Image (cartoon, helix red, strand yellow):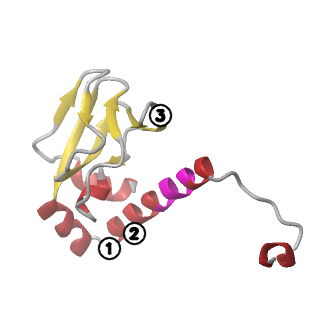
Amino acid sequence: MAAELHLFDNALGTETYAAGQVIFRQGEHGHVMYVVQDGEVDIVYLDTVLETVGSGGIIGEMALIDYSPRNASAIARTSVRLLPINEKRFHYMVQETPDFALNVMRIMAQRLRRMDRLSYPLMHFSSSEDMLG
């Protein structure tokens, strides 16, 4: 994702949050995702920190994809500087920089796999027959 983030280096409209400040809450409707330009953000589901996202990472991307309420809260772990990406800018990035879209999908897949591992302990099978039955 680093190459695509350089496209945002001179972007205007960054937001800053102090450590402990809520960026968005689980259950809220979101209209932007964020690129973390400086600092760290905790992604919190109920009372559990699922992930800490640092500089160069993104948060809140699902809001621009499925328009559903936020699955988790985002809380500034340190003071942070974030660049909000609205739907228009997101669509532009997807059209003009296909690797951006692929990287967003990779991040979402990694997060989904992480949630699956937390929800369902990894099962080990000795052979494909065990898996089938």
Q: In front: 75, or 48? A: 48
Q: Residues within 10 Å of mark 3 (few under 14, many from 20)?
A: some
Q: Residues within 10 Å of mark 2 (few under 14, many from 20)?
A: few
Q: Amino acid at mark 1?
A: Pro
Q: Amino acid at mark 2?
A: Leu
Q: Picture coordinates of residue 20 (x, y %)?
A: 31, 21
Q: Is residue 127 above or below residue 79?
A: below
Q: Picture coordinates of residue 58 (x, y %)?
A: 34, 49
- To which residue does mark 1 refer? 98
Q: Is residue 81 magenta?
A: no
- To which residue does mark 2 refer? 102
Contact between labelled residues 1 and 2, with CB atoms less than 8 Å apart: yes
- To which residue does mark 3 refer? 49
Q: In front: 111, or 53? A: 111
Residue found at the far top of this picture = 19
Q: Does residue 19 appear left or right of residue 88 in this picture?
A: right
Residue found at the far right of this picture = 126
Q: Earlier in the sequence, mark 1 or mark 3?
A: 3
Q: Amino acid at mark 3?
A: Val
